[in-house]
Amino acid sequence: MVNKERLFDSLMTLGEIGQMESGGVSRLALTDLDQKGLELIAALMKDAGLKVRMDEAGNLIGRREGRIADAPAVLTGSHSDTVHEGGRFDGALGILGAVEALRCMNEAGIVTDHPIEIYAYRDEEGCRFASSYSGSRIVTGKFEPERLTRADPDGISVAEALTELGLDWRLVDRAARSPASVRAHVELHIEQGCVLERQGVPVGIVSGICASSRGRITLTGEAQHAGTTPMSMRRDPMAAAAVIIQMIENEASRTGTTVATVGRFQTLPGGVNIIPGQVEFTLDCRDLSETVRDGVLDRITAQADEICRQRDIEFDIEIYSRGTAKLCSDEVQDAIRRSCNELGISAIALPSGAGHDSGSFHDFCPMGMIFVRSVGGVSHSPAEWSTPEDCAAGTEVLYRTLLTLAVADSARAAMPAGAGEISHN
Ligand SMILES: [Zn+2]
């Protein structure tokens, strides 16, 4: 049903907007290029027969009416922005896959009970203003006015960027939806990891978005001469850090589900012939279970404290952000699983280690995500790739999932088990 070539053409065409010499795509949030990308998406939405509008926060919306005009809408979509020199699929697949799915519904003459709306969310990546998931947070009533004052490296604030695009920043909170107006939210997205590829399956059913945490560890010893200080007389925080980082790797691996990363490391004073006086490094730790993640963090803290005590090193840890897990609803996961089964697509369930717009919906309406295999697990890179076949498979799954979610509760209750819910006009 899904037109593979048409879908892939639209992905490649959108990917030309903001394309750099490296082949990477830079359509940072609320820039002219972001706007140009949305103009193309709006044209594709109109061509697919959707009613198109932009909300007060700059999110683009394409709506397909249902049989029951004022019924809550099934929402789908993803983000329109990219990172610096990102790929052609991150965000784009969720929007253009949804456009293809609704186009197919029109071609097949299908009427759903509930309306379906595609959102192209603004500023998911947070690259320009350090303000991730802004568009979807506004839609779900999580608007933080403070974000409007955040500025990009050129000193342009979010409010100013909105004004330049002809939007009134004083009205952005009007883009919020009432929970009563939304039936469910389902997002198609590339996996951005290598689990599906390793398992040899094209599609994944996301179980939830991991609870992330970020922290900073500081180890203080004594800066001394690298040549004159015998090994037995040193208080070397670098050597302690090496042991601690090894221990972090072990502790995260032990649970089988946790991931922990030391991504940034700083040495003071940082001379080739100086034993460092202090080192500081970051700790990013995630798990689908907050309890498991917090247990890992507690064990890391206790053991690091002990390692430092034995080496006469001062130890300090600050966990400055501790997010919550955003579990996908059983209802949406079941609808996705059923779609995969009907299509004969073998799919596996997996958590999302990365954050997504769908996370904004976890306490707002039933939500879920469909992952599509990423070649080599590469993302946020010019080399990001998913095959036309896999993109089409994910879109087929989205198509069927949307149909399932767009059936009225009354119709569902009246339906014999296993009956199709597709009606043709
Ligand atoms: Zn994304």
Image (cartoon, rainbow, N blue to C red):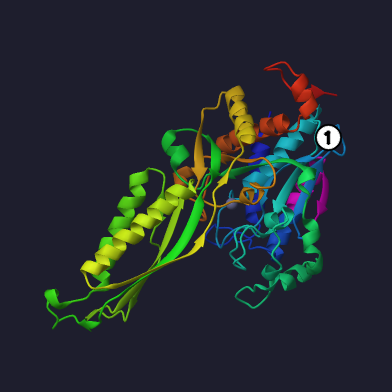
Front-most of 166 and 180?
Answer: 180
Which residues fall within the magenta stretch? 40-56
Q: Is residue 167 above or below residue 72?
A: below
The picture quadrant where one finds residue 311 is bottom left
Q: Residue at x 49, y 55 (%)?
A: 212
Q: Is residue 100 above or below residue 258?
A: above
Q: Is mark 1 within 8 Å of ligand 1?
A: no
The picture quadrant where one finds residue 315 is bottom left
Res. 108 in view? no
Residue found farthest to the right: 69
Disc tally is 1
The picture quadrant where one finds residue 231 is bottom left
Mark 1 residue crowding within 10 angstroms, few (<14) / some (14–19) / many (20+):
many
**Residue 304 in the image: x percent, y percent?**
30, 63
Task: Give the residue pinned by disc 1.
Answer: 66
Q: Please identify the quadrant where the C terminus is shown.
A: top right
**Residue 88 in the image: x percent, y percent?**
59, 51
**Callout 1 amino acid:** Gly
Label 1 element class: loop
Q: Residue at x 61, y 23 (%)?
A: 342
Q: Please identify the quadrant where the N terminus is shown.
A: top right
Q: Is residue 47 left or right of residue 273?
A: right
- Find out whether residue 354 is within the magenta segment: no
Q: Residue at x 43, y 48 (%)?
A: 292
- Find out whether residue 52 is within the magenta segment: yes
**Residue 279 in the image: x percent, y percent?**
33, 73
**Residue 111 in the image: x percent, y percent?**
82, 29
Res. 84 in view? yes
